[in-house]
Amino acid sequence: MLLRAGGRRLLAPGLRRVLGGGGLLADPVAVGGGRAYHERVVDHYENPRNVGSFENDDPSVGTGLVGAPACGDVMKLQIRVDESSGKIVDACFKTFGCGSAIASSSVATEWVKGKQMEEVLTIKNSEIAKHLSLPPVKLHCSMLAEDAIKAAVKNYEAKKAKLGQKGKVTAAEKAAEA
């Protein structure tokens, strides 16, 4: 977690100055003229859930790789799908980016687990941003998470189609019809 360690040095000193120690913030506060992260961002940043990766060759795995050239954030989100039920049974991520991007990835992996493919396509960036209380300047991080979820589902469905399971209506097609 080299990237997390570098980000933590940027985030933690300012918070420790305000808090006088290691507590978490209940609300965002100003730190040295800037704005600190909300406690949920700090929690998912310092204790990210589901960091890692699955084998790309696994037919039950879908991979979404997205990036924001303007800020340099890159997010890889992977889902593992139970082929018989269509439920996402596991998810993981690797993100190169700021604390908000890491937190958005972590939240996204938590939210997709145990849900049907069609259901995860309804997760909106605005829901992630609201949950994390992201400021407007960090909304692109939640947009990346939404895009990564959609890309992972699309990748999984493309693998299935390639393996000869054509003729079935895909989750993306079902969501588009709704």
Image (cartoon, rainbow, N blue to C red):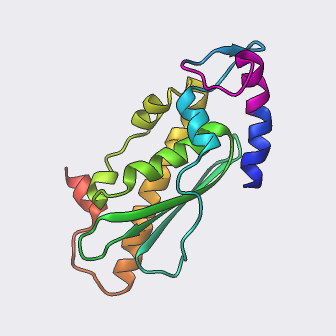
Q: Residue at x 68, y 13 (%)?
A: 30
- From the top left corner, tell me how far across and down residue 69 is, in percent: 68, 46
Residue 121 in sight in this render: yes
Return the residue nearer the eye: 46 or 151: 46
Check if residue 24 falls in the magenta segment: yes
- From the top left corner, tell me how far across and down residue 17 is, in percent: 78, 19
Residue 101 in sight in this render: no
- From the top left corner, tell me how far across and down residue 22 is, in percent: 70, 28
Residue 127: quadrant of the picture = top left
Vertical arrangement, residue 129 with respect to residue 15, above or below: below
- From the top left corner, tell me how far across and down residue 165 is, in percent: 28, 83
Residue 18: quadrant of the picture = top right
Label count reads 0
Hey, which residue is sitting farthest bottom in the picture? 164
Q: Residue at x 73, y 23 (%)?
A: 21
Vertical arrangement, residue 152 with respect to residue 2, above or below: below
Q: Residue at x 55, y 77 (%)?
A: 55
Residue 10: quadrant of the picture = top right
Return the residue nearer the eye: 91 or 134: 91
Left-right relation of 175 to 21:
left
Vertical arrangement, residue 91 with respect to residue 127, above or below: below
Q: Which region shows up in magenta?
A: 11-26
Q: Residue at x 29, y 65 (%)?
A: 87
Left-right relation of 115 to 177:
right
Check if residue 135 falls in the magenta segment: no
Vertical arrangement, residue 16 with respect to residue 33, above or below: below
Left-right relation of 118 to 61:
left
Return the residue nearer the eye: 19 or 111: 19
Q: Quadrant of the N terminus?
A: bottom right
